[in-house]
Image (cartoon, rainbow, N blue to C red):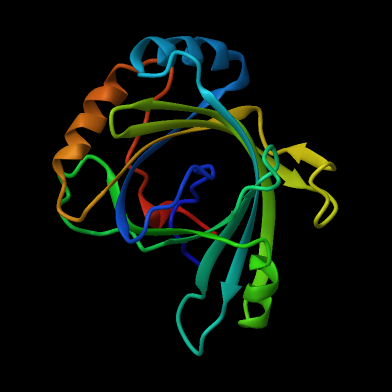
Amino acid sequence: MEAPPVTVMPVTGGTINMMEYLLQGSVLDQALDSLLHRLRGLCDNMEPETFTDHELVYLLKGQQGNPFILRARRSLSHPTAPWHLRYLGQPEVGDKSRHALVRNCVDVATSHSLPEFLNEMGFRMDHEFVANGHIFRKGAMKVVVTKLSRILVPGNTENIERLSLSYLVELSVLAPAGQDTVSEDMRSFAEQLKPLVHLEKIDPSKQRH
């Protein structure tokens, strides 16, 4: 079953019905310090924000076609903060010359009873993971460097295992539909991160859920 590329953007406020422009890449653990040093020099915040989040991915299967996917996310470092519910639409086909992947993004803050609500609505949890890392900002652009870990015992966010020996790097902008010039700014910024990391427009047809 094909699905949009996974995103692990941390819980940092809510945005309703915007378009997400996205470039993705990865960097090996041993190159992390060099990348963070480069980002400190390029971005507005010298010291990045840090996060540790728990994300649960829920599916609602229909009569036909792909299931409807919602993502519930909570901050482990700030347990009293609201949960966030995120819907990510299918990537737009649009202009092939566009430098970034573009998809609809709906992100709303919710109460802590979100998992129970989704279960009552008929959703079932498909998988969960812990994401921790760093957030940099450059104007409207956000750079998130994330380590992903699988949860070995369902619901136990202390019992985890790292998924890989690399960090996921995501460059994104949230903007109203039609603001395609932001993808040019993103491409220019991504060029400055080479050769440490190559941020690309991920082909959704090559992603597997």
Residue 90 vs residue 39, the one in the foreground: 39
Residue 79 place in picture, x, y as percent:
71, 45
Position above or below: 140 against 174: above
Look at 27% across and 23% down and name the residue there.
189
Q: Is residue 60 left or right of residue 203?
A: right
Position above or below: 31 against 209: above
Residue 168 vs residue 209, the one in the foreground: 168
Look at 67% across and 61% down and name the residue there.
112
Residue 63 vs residue 208, the one in the foreground: 63
Residue 174 vs residue 60, the one in the foreground: 174
Q: Is residue 54 left or right of residue 85?
A: right
Position above or below: 43 against 173: above
List the single residue furthest toward the bottom: 63
Please identify the quarter of the rendering in which residue 197 is found: top left
Count the marks: how many?
0
Look at 35% across and 19% down and name the residue there.
44
Residue 15 place in picture, x, y as percent:
38, 53
Q: Is residue 138 left or right of residue 187?
A: right
Please identify the quarter of the rendering in which residue 114 is found: bottom right
Q: Is residue 165 left or right of residue 204?
A: right
Residue 25 place in picture, x, y as percent:
44, 33
Q: Quadrant of the C terminus?
A: bottom right
Residue 50 place in picture, x, y as percent:
58, 28
